[in-house]
Amino acid sequence: MTSNALPQENHRILIIDDNEAIHDDLRKILAPDQAGAGELQDDEAFLFGIEPLNLIRFDVQSAYQGQEGLERVRQSLLDGRPFAVAFVDIRMPPGWDGVETITRIREVDPNLQTVICTAYSDYSWSDIHRRLGHSDSLLILKKPFDNIEVTQLAYALSRKWQVSRQAELRMADMDRLVAIRTAELQEAQQRIQRELEDRTAAQEAFQTIFQSGPFGIALIDKQGSYIDVNRSYEQLLGLEKQDLIGRNIGTLSVQDRRIFEECRDELRSQGRIEAKEINLLLKREEPRTVLIWVRRVEIQDCRHDLLFILDITERRRMEEELRRARTAAEEAARAKTEFVTNVSHEIRTPMNGIIGFTQLALNAEPTPEQREYLNTVETSAQALLGIINNILDFSKIESGRLELERLSFSLRECLEAARMTVSPEAIRKGLELTIETAPEVPDALAGDPGKLRQVVLNLLGNGLKFTEHGSVTLRVSMEEAAGRRAILHFTVEDTGIGIPPEKQARVFEPFRQVDGSVTRKYGGTGLGLAISAKLVEIMGGRIWLESEPGRGTKFHFTCRFDLAQAEVTAPRKAAAVPAGHTLLSILVTDDNPTNRTLASLLLKKYGHTVVTAANGVEAVERVAEHRFDLVLMDLQMPEMDGFQALAEIRKLEGRLGRHIPVVAMTAHAVEGEREHCLEAGMDDYLSKPYGATDLLNLVSRVGDQFSLECNPPAPGPKAILPD
């Protein structure tokens, strides 16, 4: 409670007396009947012409023994309605007397004003004083008592109770204010002490930083003279502090004075210098390259400049070395990419002849023994082609040139196509090869089916390669579904040789297999799993394995797909050239005689007329002299490559008055090559090595697109050069 909430007037009186008549008398005096008192005051006002008094009516409570009085006082305090005055009889047999009662009451409520009512006392005043003390809250009222005296005591003591409480509250407020002010003064004193300590610590810290920092620091006055320098500054310039103090900053030797003047101009105009690079000429060693910063500061109301110098000579040397190393690394990466691409091209070119002529031989009704030999040749060629494709894929991934397609496809058809690809190997080894797809797995997906099929093929092929007995199983389940997206969980489980725990972490590293003996027994480049891991990562998933030697391996991977908006149609399978197809006049341009012969034989077998050219120059000459429905153009050729020849042919079209379809045929099968060819003006693209069906379907497709209706023939028979 504060002085703003002072106690209200307290008119509660407690009478403690064993004589009931005393209670009645005091109650009549202190709490008279309101109606009678009011009538009496009205009569007095009428008879004597005086204003009626506003008399206080006290709230009088009674107790007939000291113990009862003590309980009434205690309860009043608990109720928050304390008594202001207590009239206590001095003699109350058989219990406590008045002195004992007052002593006990003071222990409970020391603020209670007490009046001893006595006609005869067993105590002398000295005894009472000894027991109760000479207190200003104790009065003695002799019986029989006077009404006015009782009333005056009640008025005075209740008012005194209120004033005492107010004084106590005001004193408490004063104590509280004094405590608050004292605390504030102590806090201010502590704050000042802390500020002094912080300032001292800051000065010490500044000196520590100033002296031990790796930057060279100098404090310069407004005339440009040194006031102080740190040890790094001394070491940088090779001079002692005493040799620098008082000297002008202009005595610094710089390689280019123009830059020094620029620094001065910048400081005058902007009041600061930001990371300006200059070369210092020092007598003790070679020039040093430094960065300087300058800040204007006020010290004791005087302008000063704070100069920072950082020696970056070694950093510049390292940056130059890193630049050269980066250039060398980029050149090495470029050389590696070119090497892989060239090797791929050089291998694909003869592979085209091997695969193509093998297929021609297989279609020529060989003997069973010859067919077996030819099948072996074709299988070996396809295996070699797979190795080349893996190396190319890994090169694309390493260079960051591998991009995902987004196509709608059927998951189950994609997986079945992968199974059909490797099923001959499973049949050959007598292994069970199955696919189990959970019912909740959606079939219509949007993503890159080619990359998914490649991962599945790698894992299925890996399982078949390392399994001699038992089975290889592909399981697909739903791991997570959210809106129009799904994360699928693929598991390829085999019953093969397994992988030791200490070797499992290496299987996803490129060019690594479990150990050398496995490599010798089973073969392989060790790229399949590394490529699979990268492809899975690109498709928003992860790959891991579980394995136990002798009990097989489980490869797990997840992929993120969108759900297709519409039902996926089955992919169209390559079909043989239909009967009654349009016969075309075709120019085959290739610097490799084997590839020219292969393409000629395949096309002639189906009735097309074929002319060949060994390079771009010959191709342009043939097109200028004769009419062709289609030009098959190799890209890498001597004298004039395919792109140059294409440009010359496109120039001829204006004179010939018609469009000449040109299809790129190349073993340079790298990411983006097809797009590059189409952007250059090619009408289509065919990658080597190609099969007979691939070539004939392309010719049929181009023939349909650029039919004779678009390019009507000239009158008379076509002029055909002998092959």
Image: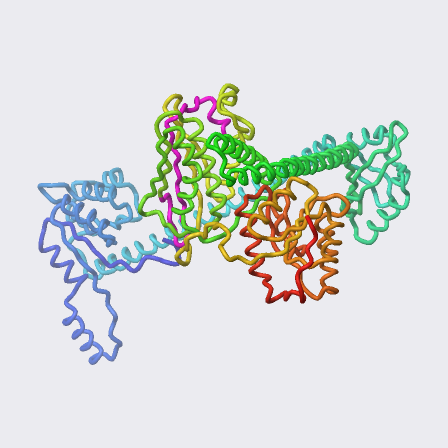
Q: Is-magenta flag for residue 495?
A: yes
Q: In the displayed structure, does residue 71 sit left or right of residue 323?
A: left
Q: Is-magenta flag for residue 390?
A: no
Q: In the displayed structure, does residue 306 sit left or right of residue 86?
A: right
Residue 295, visible in the rendered structure: no
Q: Is residue 85 above or below residue 461?
A: below
The residue lying toward the viewer, choosing from 473 and 190, is 473
Where residue 406 sits in the image (x, y, percent)? 50, 52
The residue lying toward the viewer, choosing from 606 and 632, is 606
Where residue 393 sits in the image (x, y, percent)? 57, 39
Q: Residue at x 75, y 64 (%)?
A: 655
Residue 56, visible in the rendered structure: yes
Which quadrant holds residue 381?
top right
Q: Is residue 121 above or below residue 162?
A: above
Q: In the displayed structure, does residue 626 sit left or right of residue 55?
A: right
The color scheme shown is rainbow
Q: Which residues are magenta?
A: 478-507
The residue lying toward the viewer, choosing from 17 and 161, is 161
Residue at far top of view: 517
Count of labels in the image: 0
Q: Is residue 581 above or below residue 595?
A: below
Q: Residue at x 68, y 41 (%)?
A: 592
Q: Residue at x 23, y 38 (%)?
A: 127
Q: Residue at x 40, y 35 (%)?
A: 492
Where residue 122 sits in the image (x, y, percent)? 16, 41
Where residue 75 sits in the image (x, y, percent)? 19, 49
The residue lying toward the viewer, choosing from 172 and 644, is 644
